[in-house]
Structures are given as C-alpha cells and as structure tokens.
C-alpha cells in the first residue's frame, strides 16, 4: 500500500489532511506503516497532546463485506480519497470543526480506539456516538447516511470504555456519509447537515481565497508552490485557549515558535489579516520582562527557552511592500510597538551580563541553531548575529514610533541602532569575518559555522567592503555553497556531520536571513542564484527542513520552515 502519484502532499511524511483553522485532521501512523502499511487515524493538535503518548484519537480503515481492504491514497487540498478495489472513500472538511467521510458501492469504515481512564465513547442521540478525549476535545460521530455499529463496553475499574470497535455501515443504497464534529466542549447533533458537495465547495472556496492572497510564481517555482501553500494553509489554527489570534504550527501536530511565527508573517505579507495575526500572537505569551517564549500554543508555552529577536528583520522586509500604519489598527500597532520594544530591551537589560553593550546567548538553543559549532566550548556566547538582529529591530521600532507620532522615541531607537552597529563592527569584525566571543572571558571564537555570516542580514547597513568580503566567501563552490544552497557548517570542517541540526544541513532560516540580507545589500543576482538552488532542491528533496548538502534527501521532516522560506525566496527571485 502506498500513495498514488501526483499527490499534493505526502500524508505518510507527517503532513495531515486538514484545513485552515481546524484543530484536528487525518494523519498517517508513520511507525505502524513500516509494519502494516499505510494506516490512517483522526488526530488532534490541541496542546494537551503533549501529555499523551501520541495524538491518535480514532483509527480509520476502509472495509468491504466485514473485512479491511487494501487502499491507496490521493491527496489534494480539498479532498483525501482512499481508493480500493471496490470503490472510493472520500473525505473533506466541510467546516473547520466538521470532517465528512463518504463511502460508496457497499464500502464501510472501520473505527478503532484505545481509550484511557475517564475517557468514554457514549451514545449521542439516536444515531450518533461521542468520544471524550481527556484534556483535548470531543469528537461526535454522526451518520448523516447509513448507521454506526459500535462496541464500546464500560469498564468500571478504569472508569472508561477502554476498547472501542465500530463500523460505519452503508444504507440500503450502498453508501454512507459520516460527519465527525470536533469541539473543545460537549458536542451536539446538528439540526441539519450540508450535503457532501456543499461541504466540498466550502473548503474549495476557502482554499482558493487563501491561494489568491499569496504571491504568484511561474515556471519551475510555480510547480512547487501548491504543496508549499497547502502546508502553510493546513498548519493554521483558529484562536483557542490562551491564544487571542490565529497561529501557525511548525509541524503537523506540534506547537508554534516565536521566530518561526515572524518568518511565516513575512511569507503572508500580502494576506493582511493572517499576517497581522502572526505579528501579534506571540504577544499573548510575553513575560513582564519582555521575553518571548520559544514555543507556545492554546494551552502552554515554553518560557524557559527562547529564540533570536529576528522580528525587526521581518518588519523591515514586510515594509518593503506594505505600509503597516495603514494596514494595522492603531491600537494593534501600538501593542506591537510596545511588545517588540520590550523584547528588544530584554536583551540589553538581561542578556548582557558583563554590561559591555553586546548581548549574549546563554545557550545554543537561543540562537535557533542549537548545536552550531560556535557553541562547542561554551553556551554563553557574544555572537555577531544577535547584535545584528537587534540593530534591525531597533531601526524597525524607530519606524513604528514615527508612524505612531512618537518622534523622540523614533530618534532614540535610531541612535541605539547606529551605536550597536558600530560596536558590532568595531569589536567583532576582524577584517576577514565576524567572530564570536566567549561571553565571560571575551576569548575569540572562530569556527566554520555559517552562523558567522548571519550579520549579512544587515544588508545595506554594512560597509561595502564587508558586504563584498562576506558575499565572496559565500560564493566559493564547495565551501558553504553547494548545489542545494548554503550548508550550516563547511563540509571540510572537522565538526561537519549529518547529525543534530546545524553542523552541516542546509537549513531554511540560514538561507532566509542571509539571502534576504544579501539582496538588500545590493548583491541581487548572487542572492537570487543561491536562493534558486535552495528552492529547486525541493524538487529532489521535498519540503524538508533538513537537507544534506551533498546528497539532498535526508529522511523527511515536513514543517512550515522550508515552505515559508521557499515562498519568501521564490517571491524575491521572481517578483523583486
């Protein structure tokens, strides 16, 4: 069993079948696929999943004459189709909380679940059944056509119906239509349900509306765009719990990240409502000191970790095409200004232990490139990229201050940006490259990590000779530059390895920050050439976060980082 050709996305690679805004979807059990072939299940991505062994709620399988039957899968944004020798079972999201599964030709659908203490499968109305998944949600299964034969025996010792086995049976005409409703609270059978065609039209309209608001691509890049767009669309969830705004997940069932959020905001620069939501949702979890957490979702955050302050880069890149003051309500713009300002100040107040003016990372994770060789001897590093990000953030805050009529604050941010830029160059540029320093001893740290070149994100703010030298270094074939983009560690380095993350892999954030900076610095054709290599690597490798610079493919790790990077760089290549 496997997927048919020309699928929009690879469901067995970790991508769910879902739709924008939904908190549940259909997933593939990747581990069991090795043993049993492709196995699908309905799963949740609400934050409570972290407290469970996995996100599986209900396994589903086509059946014929009472037996499971083999199938292949076809995927599109609107439909997931299970193709059997006896006909098809078609699935679509008729609403953000409503999944339809439709069978024909006498096919039925098997339902299987193992439930934990306090979890139950219970009757709901005359025909429906409701699954209570503790700390997550409820799923109401209602046969709009056909019926459900359910076995879910109560076990008092477990306060549960621990083993659930059911079958969605066809009606006398040989077809069934199952509605699966997801809710944070108890579900109720609806007074009426749209037919499958109406549901399909609903999701198709939502998809086309989404696509219409994204940049147009042509040629080879256009061929890759639909899968990238589906990944982005499918990872968006509606506000819930602690979150006031929509957010976009990193992976199919994992939480969001503050620096990943701003990268996606740049990819969504022309979809103003979503872009604005992505600019603001991290503010929901900001600490009183100004810190943004690394990860967050509807029920939790990870404030013990954080990621670099690249929000200024994001704002400045968006501002190339958009007037934020005209597109963001003043109260929201003020909230962004104050929140991002507190974030910028956090680094200068609480991440500069020696008070020398250059902030430091306290862990490789803080840089976003967790195991970079820059952190080989110490986790406490004055890294050049951190200062560079803050230079741009200070400048962007000055732009926002001007839009809000705060002239004195505008000037203050401008002066802080210029002062930090001068110090960065004076103290960390050694004439050949930007070095890092041990935050405690100030001993120079020189490695063969691409992190040393991230200050190129400063673009035109750097002196011409530094731009020329850094660009020339990055254009040497076989050093950082390879056929798929820029490696995170030189392949000839003693620290190079295809383990971990930032010791060799071609990584999306490196491409994004360096190449947009190179473009801004006036090295337009050079930036586009490298960006094209990275974007076209997706033809060979799929939209994988981790790309082996020598061999391209390295397993499969589907997430929104490569897709948002592709969309931004492809737009830069063709539309700027």
Image (spheres, rainbow, N blue to C red):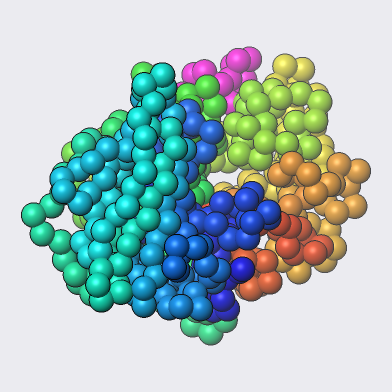
| Residue 381 is at least partly visible in this image | yes
**Residue 296: horizontal and vertical position, in percent?**
43, 34
Side (left or right) of 105 relative to 520 = left
**Is 483 situated left or right of 135 in this image?**
right
When the figure is inspected, residue 269 is found, relative to residue 4, above or below; the finding is: above
Image point 83% across, 52% down: which residue?
490
* Outermost residue, bottom side: 219
Image position of 193 with respect to 438: above or below: below
Quarter of the image where one finds residue 156: top left
Looking at the figure, which quarter contains the N terminus? Answer: bottom right
Q: Nearer the viewer, residue 362 or 45?
A: 45
Residues in magenta, as a range:
344-359
* Residue 343 forms part of the magenta stretch: no
The answer to whether 363 is drawn above or below residue 194 in the figure is above
Q: Give the image location of residue 116, x and y in percent.
A: 44, 29
The relative height of residue 507 versus residue 207 in the rendered view (above or below) is above
Q: Residue at x 62, y 51 (%)?
A: 32
């Amino acid at each position: 069993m496997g997927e048919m050709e020309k699928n929009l996305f690879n469901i067995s690679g970790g991508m769910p079948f879902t739709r924008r805004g939904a908190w549940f979807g259909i997933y593939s059990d990747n581990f069991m696929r090795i043993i049993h072939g492709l196995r699908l299940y309905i799963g949740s991505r609400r934050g409570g999943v972290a407290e469970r062994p996995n996100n599986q709620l209900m396994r589903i399988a086509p059946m014929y004459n009472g037996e499971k039957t083999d199938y292949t899968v076809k995927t599109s944004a609107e439909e997931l189709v299970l193709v059997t020798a006896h006909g098809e079972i078609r699935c679509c999201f008729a609403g953000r909380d409503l999944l339809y599964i439709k069978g024909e030709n006498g096919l039925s659908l098997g339902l299987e679940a193992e439930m934990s203490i306090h979890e139950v499968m219970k009757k709901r109305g005359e025909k429906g059944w409701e699954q209570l998944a503790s700390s997550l949600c409820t799923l109401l299964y209602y046969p709009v056509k056909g019926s459900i034969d359910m076995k879910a025996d109560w076990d008092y010792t477990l306060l549960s119906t621990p083993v659930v086995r059911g079958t969605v049976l066809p009606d006398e005409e040989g077809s069934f239509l199952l509605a699966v409703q997801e809710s944070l609270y108890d579900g109720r059978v609806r007074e009426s349900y749209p037919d499958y065609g109406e549901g399909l039209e609903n999701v198709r309209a939502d998809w086309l509306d989404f696509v219409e608001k994204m940049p147009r691509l042509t040629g080879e890049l256009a061929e890759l765009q639909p899968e990238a767009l589906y990944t982005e669309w499918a990872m968006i969830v509606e506000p819930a719990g602690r979150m006031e705004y929509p957010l976009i997940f990193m992976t199919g069932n994992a939480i969001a990240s503050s620096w990943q959020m701003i990268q996606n905001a740049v990819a969504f620069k022309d979809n103003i409502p979503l872009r604005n939501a992505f600019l603001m949702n991290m503010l929901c979890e900001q600490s009183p000191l100004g810190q943004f957490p690394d990860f967050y979702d509807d029920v939790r955050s990870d404030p013990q970790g954080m990621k670099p302050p690249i929000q200024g880069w994001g704002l400045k890149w968006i501002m190339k095409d958009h007037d934020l003051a005209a597109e963001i309500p003043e109260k929201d713009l003020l909230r962004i200004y104050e929140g991002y300002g507190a974030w910028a100040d956090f680094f200068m107040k609480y991440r500069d232990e020696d008070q020398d003016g250059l902030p430091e990372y306290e862990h490789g994770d803080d840089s976003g490139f967790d195991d970079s060789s820059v952190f080989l001897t110490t986790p406490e590093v004055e890294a050049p990229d951190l200062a560079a990000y803050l230079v741009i953030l200070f400048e962007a805050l000055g732009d926002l201050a001007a839009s809000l009529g705060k002239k004195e604050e505008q000037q203050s941010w401008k002066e802080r940006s210029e002062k930090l830029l001068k110090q960065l160059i004076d103290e960390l540029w050694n004439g050949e490259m930007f070095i890092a320093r041990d935050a405690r001893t100030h001993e120079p740290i020189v490695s063969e990590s691409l992190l040393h070149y991230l200050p190129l994100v400063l673009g035109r703010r750097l002196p011409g000779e530094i731009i020329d030298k850094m660009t020339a270094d990055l254009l040497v074939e076989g050093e950082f530059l390879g056929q798929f983009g820029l490696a995170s560690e030189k392949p000839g380095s003693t620290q190079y390895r295809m383990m971990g993350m930032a010791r060799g892999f071609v990584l999306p954030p490196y491409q994004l920050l360096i190449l947009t900076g190179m473009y801004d610095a006036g090295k337009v054709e050079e930036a586009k050439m490298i960006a094209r290599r990275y974007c076209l690597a997706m033809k060979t490798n799929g939209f994988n976060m981790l790309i082996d610079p020598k061999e391209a493919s390295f397993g499969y790790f589907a997430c929104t980082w490569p897709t948002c990077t592709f969309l931004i760089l492809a737009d830069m290549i063709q539309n700027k």
